[in-house]
Image (cartoon, grey):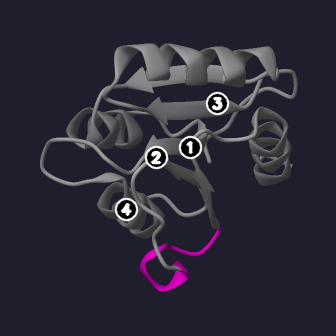
Amino acid sequence: MGQRNAYARQVVLVVEDDPLLRMMAVDLVEDAGFDAIEACGADEAMEILDSRPDIDVLFTDIDMPGSMNGVGLANWAYRAHTPLGIVLTSGHQNPSEDVLPERSVFFPKPYDFTKVVDTLRMMTV
């Protein structure tokens, strides 16, 4: 993680291709007291992660068009940007734990906002 002053808020990168769901996820993250950065797919998220060392958590949908899905993005991010908390969501898939990187948590959609916020807070302590 990059250097930051003691009063800076934790940063969560929200990756979701559906604009309405992305807006709802960003609202959830910001209402919980985090700063949110948005990406509409894995390619954009990888560029952001490579240029922003201050991102603490990757919050990504699994089902996305583009060069890789959310599981691929999560595994790339884990290898390239350790330490990084990772939260994955999907309304269509329930990935087995053996395909998810360490320090990642999966929530099926519709997810429980309280559980997601609690998980984000645990990951940024």
Is 103 situated above or below 6? Answer: below
Q: Nearer the viewer, residue 21 or 69?
A: 21
**Residue under numbered circle 3:** 11
Residue 47 colored in magenta in the image: no
Q: Earlier in the sequence, mark 2 or mark 3?
A: 3
In the rendered image, residue 44, in percent from the top left (x then y), is placed at: 26, 32
Q: Disc 4 designates what residue?
A: 71
**How far apart are the alpha carbons under marks 4 and 1?**
15 Å
Residue 121 coordinates in the image, percent (x, y): 83, 42
Spatial CA distance of label 3 from label 4 is 20 Å
> Is tag 4's residue or tag 1's residue first in the polypeptide sequence?
4
Q: Is residue 99 magenta?
A: yes
Quarter-of-image position of residue 111:
top right
User: Crowding near pointer 3: few (<14 within 10 Å), some, many (20+)?
Assistant: many
Q: Amino acid at mark 2?
A: Gly
* Residue at 20% over, 54% down: 68
Dot 4: few (<14), some (14–19), or many (≥20) neighbours within 10 Å? many
Per the image, label 3 sits on a secondary structure element best described as strand
The amino acid type found where label 3 is placed reads Val
Which label is found at residue 91? 2
